[in-house]
Image: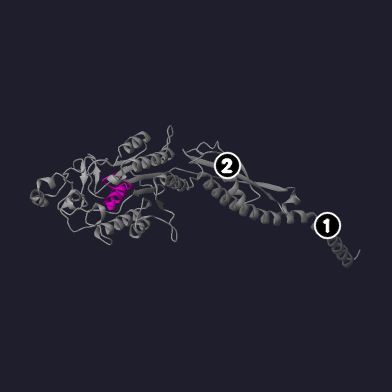
Amino acid sequence: MLPRQCLFRRLAEEKGASPLLFALLLPVLVGMVGMGVDLGNLYLSHTRLQAAVDAAALAGSLELPADPKLDKGLVAASVASMLATNYPEAEVESLSPGTEVRSVEVTAKVEVPMMLMGVLGVSDKTVRASAAAGFNHLEVVLVLDNTGSMKGTPINMVKAAASNLVDLILPAGGAPDSKMGLVAFRGKVKIGTGVDGLPAGCRNADGSLNEGIHPSFMPMYWALPHSTRRNIDLDTCSCIPETLGLTTERSEVIARLAEHTALGPGSGTVISEGIKWGRHVLTPQAPFTDANPDPSYRKIMILLTDGDTEDGTCGGPFAINYHPNNYWTNAYYGMGDSNSHCENGGALNAAMLEEAALAKAAGIEIFSIRYGDSDSTDRWLMKTVASSKPGTDDHYFDAPSIHDLDDVFKQIGRQLGWRLLK
């Protein structure tokens, strides 16, 4: 055969083999393209599922106050509802208490159909995601008004509601990594031995030891008629419950909470001092050093008061017209300051806002509870100190009646559970 004829024959054979080779390679090529498309689909499905499971775990954790053992169906219903809202095709595969106290762990799955990889015999793929949420990595301090107007039923209702919150954060028999502390305030705050280098007792606004009426005011005291002096209590500190630093011991918090009676002689209401010492308890720097410096810990201050900032100069039913008086033993008069008063826009209200700003700058969230009646200025102050999201009052609570207190503490408890643990 001539060379030219051989060449044509070879070309014809190769041309006939090309369609056959393409036919043989087509499933492989489709599979490779399909693998890229379907792997991308799997990645997007897992991302969507993880977001949905995170939301479901958070929603379930909000029901832990009423369903702590997950045996009432409240957590399960909330988890299923939230998952269905965000990813209807997904289903809850497992729901269980988390490895940490007062937490819930959720695992969900979804079947992702394989659009092109089916050519290779892969029809669908199961994608899973897990999340846990609950009441952990918390440090909470209760800053409670212990003035005389709280005595009796109000303070008892506060203690009952607060005890329920203690049970949630520091459950009996559990080993949580959360802590709680307590600060009682009137016109000043009481600190124990070994905290700030001073003897146990109440503190002035400048951190010095409060010894009642400042020595410079005592000549005024002795100049009063004996009948008037009988109405002045030089010791307005002994009856204030001592501040409790952060602890994991539930029994200690409950025992200290029982000491809050609002009884005994008062020295007014200086809310800024309560906020200040609440900040000291929640930060690891001295004077209190029990707080965890780990930024993953959520620092919470719950501030409750039933009264305006009060030092006897604001008029109304609590005004006293002789000087000095019990108010003159508060944290400002006690250090010799007779110019800081409580009128709207006054120094004590300014101090309240300043202390709240310092607490927030230290990473502390403030929940404020306004119990009883109040005017617009006092409501504005309590709303301003709260760490509410812009455009909301989600960290401020109004409790006109003692019967509102338990519900308010439950609402705060629900917000404390809104936290992913992994």
- Residue topped by disc 1: 20
Side (left or right) of 167 relative to 10: left
Q: What is the number of callouts on the image?
A: 2
Residue that extends furthest to the top in the rendered view of this protein: 173
Label 1 CA crowd tier, 10 Å (few <14, some 14–19, many 20+): few
Q: Position of residue 100 (x, y in %)?
A: 47, 38
Q: Residue at x 35, y 41 (%)?
A: 153
Confirm whether residue 129 shows in the render.
no
Place of residue 158 in the rendered image (x, y in percent of width and height, measured from the top left):
37, 42
Query: Observer-nearest residue: 184 or 372?
Result: 372
Q: Is residue 68 left or right of residue 398?
A: right
- On the question of residue 237 being in view, the answer is yes
Residue 273 magenta-highlighted:
yes
Query: Which residue type does callout 2 highlight?
Result: Ala
Q: Which residue is mark 2?
A: 76
**The furthest residue to the right:** 1
Q: Which residues are magenta?
A: 269-288
Q: CA distance from mark 1 to mark 2?
A: 57 Å
Q: Considering depth in this image, is 41 or 304 the residue closer to the camera?
A: 304
